[in-house]
């Protein structure tokens, strides 16, 4: 059974097709990349999958359930977590408190898990530091592990490498690989081709809202349609 199935999804704004009849499927326990030039529809597609944008047509299934039309909060409850291009941390809360805002249940158990998540990305020493005092890259890691607090089966990462220094990026990529090894499924939007080609097992390419290629990184790098989309003739 596929973890996620996207079928002929389309979304237009003012008559302009941001996403046009895009289809793909994600199998459990794998890392996928979604790439394309700026404005190719990647974030809009993420928003359609996670319920932040209403799709004009098409279907999305998570495991065996249709989720198109559901509210974003319900989709998150079903087991899909995501990060955003623009960091969404609470600067006036500590790193640990930023993780606790998405939890329910006993405080002690939530704090234990929160500290465990910060340790997962080597930020345990900063648990009591205000998020506003953290570096950009550290804030991205906090947002990343906040998604993990809800124990999602599918994780969507929107440009996780952007603006992150190499040391923190290596910590993030190692964490993503460990999640895959635990059986999680990851779909990431990323402009850093070294990250995509080194981490992802299958890559989907969008251009002008349409999927123009799909396959392993080596084939994608050599695909004439992909080269043309990025660099032109």
Image (spheres, rainbow, N blue to C red):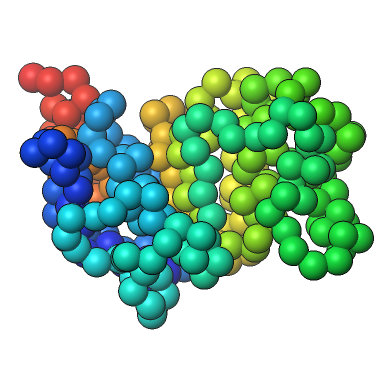
Residue at 42 percent across and 61 percent down: it is 71
The percent position of residue 111, horizontal first and vertical second, equals 86, 54
Q: Quadrant of the N terminus?
A: bottom left
Q: Quadrant of residue 138?
A: top right
Q: Is residue 35 rendered to the left or right of residue 107?
A: left
64 over 149 or under it: above or below: below
Q: Nearer the viewer, residue 151 or 171?
A: 151
Labels in figure, total: 0
Left or right? Give the position of 102 relative to 216: right
Q: Hey, which quadrant is residue 141 in on the image?
A: top right
Residue 34 horizontal/vertical position (percent): 34, 43
Is 82 located above or below residue 126 in the figure? below
Residue drawn at (43%, 28%), measured in percent from left and top? 192
Q: Is residue 11 visible?
A: yes
Residue 36, percent across and down?
27, 34
Picture quarter with the C terminus: top left
Q: Position of residue 51 (x, y in %)?
A: 38, 56
The answer to whether residue 39 is left or right of residue 147 is left
Residue drawn at the location 50% of the way across and 25% of the way down: 162
Does 87 sit above or below residue 46? above
Query: Depth check: 157 or 110 in front?
Result: 110
**Closest to the observer, 55 or 157:** 55
Residue 222 seen in the figure: no
């Amino acid at each position: 059974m596929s973890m996620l199935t996207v079928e002929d999804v389309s979304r237009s704004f003012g008559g302009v097709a941001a996403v046009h009849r895009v289809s793909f499927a994600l199998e459990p326990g794998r890392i996928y990349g979604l790439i394309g030039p700026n404005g190719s529809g990647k974030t809009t597609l993420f928003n359609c999958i996670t319920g932040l944008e209403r799709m004009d047509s098409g279907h999305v299934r998570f495991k065996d359930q249709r989720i198109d039309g559901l509210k974003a909060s319900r989709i998150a409850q079903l087991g899909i977590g995501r990060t955003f291009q623009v960091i969404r941390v609470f600067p006036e809360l500590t790193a640990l408190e930023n993780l606790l805002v998405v939890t329910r249940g006993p405080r002690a158990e939530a704090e234990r898990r929160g500290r465990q998540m910060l340790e997962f990305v080597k930020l345990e020493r900063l648990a009591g530091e205000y998020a506003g005092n953290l570096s950009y890259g550290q804030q991205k890691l906090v947002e990343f592990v906040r998604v993990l607090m809800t124990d999602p089966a599918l994780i969507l990462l929107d440009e996780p490498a952007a603006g992150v220094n190499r040391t923190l990026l290596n910590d993030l990529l190692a964490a993503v690989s460990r999640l895959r090894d635990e059986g999680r499924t990851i779909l990431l939007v990323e402009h850093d081709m070294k990250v995509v080609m080194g981490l992802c097992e299958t890559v989907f390419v969008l251009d002008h809202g349409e999927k123009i290629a799909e396959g392993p990184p080596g084939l994608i790098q050599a695909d004439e349609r992909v080269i043309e989309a990025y660099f032109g003739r």
